[in-house]
Image (cartoon, rainbow, N blue to C red):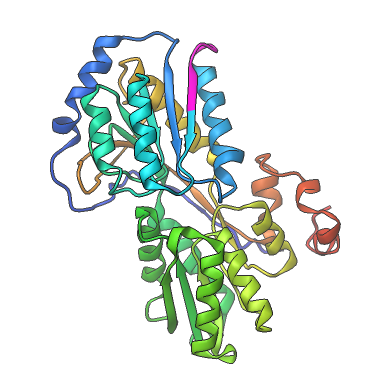
Amino acid sequence: MRRAAFAVAAGAMAVSLAACGSAKESGGGAAKSADSKKKGDAITVGLLLPENQTARYEKFDRPLIEKKVSELTNGKGKVVYANAKQDATLQSQQVDTMITNKVDVLVVDAVDAAAIKNSVQKAHDAGIPVVAYDRLAQGPIDAYTSFDNVTVGKTQGEALLKALGAKAKSGKIVMMNGSSTDPNAAQFKAGAHQVLDGKVNVGKEYDTKEWKPENANSNMEGAISALGKKNIIGVYSANDGMAGGIITALKQAGINVPVTGQDAELAGVQRIVAGEQFMSVYKPYAPEAAAAAEMAVSLAQGKSLDSVAKDKVDSPTTKGVPSVLVAVTSLTKDNIKDTVIKDGVYTLADICTAQYKAACDKAGLK
C-alpha cells in the first residue's frame, strides 16, 4: 500500500518575526544569576501548562518532562506543576507563585504569548531563567522548544489538497484556525495558506476562541448555514479537538468531506481509522519534552545550551533565542503502525476498541 505519510525535517531556520532587543542583551540578568548559583542536581523546575482540554498536556507533556528532569538530575530534581486551564490571568498568578517559591527555572507553555510578557520579565528580574515550551512566549525568554509550526500548517494543507484531488476547486472549503491568542495558531494558518491559496476556494474562515471543540462546532454550523451543505468539499481544522466538533456538525448535516487535524489524539486517530477524519499531524512529544527538560536543567545549573539547542528563533521581543525544533509527520490511515503505535504512544488495543474493530481490521490494524 502506498504510504501517504511524509516526515518533515525541522531545519536550522530562524522564525523571522519583528524583533527588538536580543537574547544576549535582555537575557543577561537571568544568565548571570544561573551562573552564580552553580546548582547541583537538587533543583526545582516550575512547569506551567496552558490547559487541560487537549489530551496531550496531562497524558504526555507533563509526565515526560517530569521523567526527563528526574533522569538528568539523578532523581534529585523535582518538578512543581500548575495548569492554567486556558486562563491567562491565572497563569500570571501561577508565575508569581513560582517566583515567590524561588524555583530555579521555569518551563512555560503560555495561554497567551503576549499577555505572559510581564510575567516572564518578572521571572527574569528575579534571576529565574524561562524556557518557552511549545508556544513562543514574549519577554526575555532564555530558550524555546516546539515544532516548525509553519511546516505543520503546510503539512495539513498539502494533505487536504491530496484528499481533494481534482475536486479542489469544485466547491468551498472551511478553514477552522486555532485561537488568536496562540502564536502557533497564526503560524499554522500561515503555513496552510501558503499551500492552499490559489488552489482552493475558502468559503469561510474562523479563528476559534480558546481552541474549544464546542466553538469549532458552532462555527461549523454557521459555515454550513452560510455556504450550503452541497457546496462544502473539505475542512481545514488546525487540531484534532476542533476536528471532533467540526465532524459532529458535518454528520448532523449529512456531510462527509476530508477534515484535517493535529496532535494525533486518540479520538482523532480513531476517527482516521473510521474514515471520518482524513489526517492528523503527529508531533512526537518525547523529543520536545526532553529538549525542554534538558534546557531547563542546564539553565538551572548555569550550564551552556550549546550542546542542546542547535537552532535560533526570533520572537517579537527577543532575537536569537536558543531553540530546538522537532520534526513532524503527516498521520493517515496508512502509517498509524509506523508512527503512534511504533513510538508507544498508543497500543492497538487503545485504538481498536469494540467500536472501531471492524474499521481497524479493514485498515490492516490487527
Seen from the viewer's position, the closer of residues 231 and 13 is 231
Kindly tell me whether residue 89 is visible in this rendering: yes
Q: Which quarter of the rendered picture does the N terminus lie within?
A: bottom right
Magenta stretch holds residue 246: no
Q: What stretch of residues is rendered in magenta?
A: 73-80
Q: In this view, does 305 lie to the left or right of 78?
A: left
Provide residue 136's location: percent of width, then percent of height: 33, 45
Above-or-below relation of 228 to 51: below
Q: How many marks?
A: 0
The residue shown at (36%, 69%) is 194
The residue shown at (62%, 68%) is 278
Magenta stretch holds residue 77: yes
Seen from the viewer's position, the closer of residues 233 and 251 is 251
Provide residue 243's location: percent of width, then percent of height: 58, 65
Provide residue 255's location: percent of width, then percent of height: 65, 82
Provide residue 36's location: percent of width, then percent of height: 24, 10
